[in-house]
Amino acid sequence: MRLCQNVGTTSFIFYSSAIFSFGYAALSSCIWQQVAIFQL
């Protein structure tokens, strides 16, 4: 039972960090597009 809980927690941390890094990459690319448009 504890092993199953442990795997669930690990996968939750993995998925949340992956979603966070994906959102951060999308946000930074959006900001860089705005900066490039502003410089043009």
Image (tube, rainbow, N blue to C red):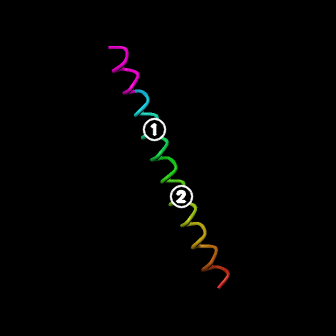
Question: Which residue lies under the disc numbered 1?
Answer: 14
Identify the residue shown where x is 41% and y is 33%: 12
- Dominant secondary-structure state across the stretch colored magenta: helix
Task: From this view, report whether residue 19 is shown above or below residue 36.
Answer: above
Identify the residue shown where x is 58% and y is 61%: 28
**Of the residues under marks 1 and 2, which one precedes in the sequence?**
1
The x, y position of residue 34, in whole percent, is 59, 73
SS under mark 1: helix
The x, y position of residue 24, in whole percent, is 54, 54
Q: Which amino acid does the dot numbered 2 rest on? A: Ala
Q: Residue furthest bottom?
A: 40
Q: Residue furthest top?
A: 1
Task: From this view, report whether residue 37 is shown above or below residue 9.
Answer: below
* Magenta residue span: 1-8
Identify the residue shown where x is 45% and y is 38%: 14
Q: Residues within 10 Å of mark 1 (few under 14, many from 20)?
A: few
Quadrant in the picture for the C terminus: bottom right
Choose mark 1 or mark 2, whichever is in front. Answer: 1
The x, y position of residue 30, in whole percent, is 54, 67
Q: Which amino acid does the dot numbered 1 rest on? A: Phe
Left or right of residue 32: residue 22: left
Question: Which residue lies under the disc numbered 2?
Answer: 25
